[in-house]
Image (cartoon, rainbow, N blue to C red):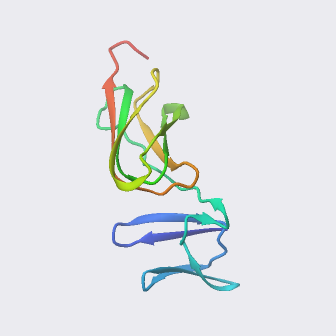
């Protein structure tokens, strides 16, 4: 079963799987799920009965601010994490580069981490997936993808 929750302050949606909830709400700062089995406190803790919680997001498809075909050099992650995170780029025709794992200092403080992208990945349009590794917590303040425009004649 799948549940979708939307934060109306920033219009960001979260998707929850394997929760048997028919509705969710935030009451006194606590996320509560309601379902056939009753009310449950949800989304607290860093594991699901001892299993790390997988979290990720995928950006909409974009041209990364450049209309020409481009190659990717690196990306900068700005945010917080208490473990490692991984990045994956998917371009035209669903060609994927990565995952590239970023080693993040084990502290919940603001960090900037540069992640090198492998050579040979080129596209006009693409999307970025960021995910946690082994259930690590992360919060994103910004991601900058640094690309160079491919030279004329390169396909």
Quadrant housing residue 37: bottom right
Q: The C terminus is located in which quarter?
A: top left
Which quadrant of the structure image shows residue 28? bottom left
Residue 32, x across and y down, in percent: 54, 81
Against 109, residue 95 (above or below) is above
Outermost residue toward the right in this view:
37
Is residue 122 shown left or right of residue 33? left
Residue under the image location 61 percent in, 79 percent down: 22
Find residue 12 and report its image quarter: bottom left
Side (left or right) of 129 relative to 146: right
> Which residue is painted at 35% across and 20% down in the image?
150
Q: Would residue 109 be found to the left or right of residue 56 on screen?
A: left
Q: In which quadrant is the N terminus drawn?
A: bottom right
Q: Tag count in the figure? A: 0
Q: Nearer the viewer, residue 45 or 76?
A: 45
Q: Is residue 82 above or below residue 115?
A: below
In the displayed image of the protein, which residue is found farthest to the left?
65
Residue 108 vertical placement versus 44 (above, below): above
Front one among 114 and 127: 114
Which residue is the extreme one toward the front?
106
**Residue 151 placed where, x, y %?**
33, 15
Q: Nearer the viewer, residue 96 or 28?
A: 28
Identify which residue is drawn at 42% across, 43% down: 61
Residue in view at x 49 percent, y 81 percent: 25
Residue 65 at x, y percent in the picture: 29, 37
């Amino acid at each position: 079963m799948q549940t979708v929750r939307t934060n109306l302050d920033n219009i960001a949606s979260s998707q929850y799987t394997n929760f048997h909830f028919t509705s969710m709400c935030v009451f006194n700062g606590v996320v509560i799920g309601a379902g056939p089995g009753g009310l449950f406190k949800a989304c607290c803790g860093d594991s699901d009965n001892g299993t790390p919680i997988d979290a990720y997001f995928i950006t909409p498809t974009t041209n990364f601010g450049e209309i020409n075909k481009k190659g990717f050099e690196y990306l900068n992650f700005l945010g917080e994490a208490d473990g490692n995170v991984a990045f994956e780029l998917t371009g035209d025709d669903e060609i994927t580069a990565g995952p590239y794992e970023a080693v993040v200092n084990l502290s919940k403080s603001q960090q900037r981490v540069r992640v090198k992208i492998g050579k040979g990945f080129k596209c006009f349009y693409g999307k970025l997936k960021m995910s946690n590794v082994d259930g690590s917590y992360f919060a994103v303040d910004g991601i900058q993808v640094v690309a160079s425009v491919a030279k004329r004649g390169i396909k």
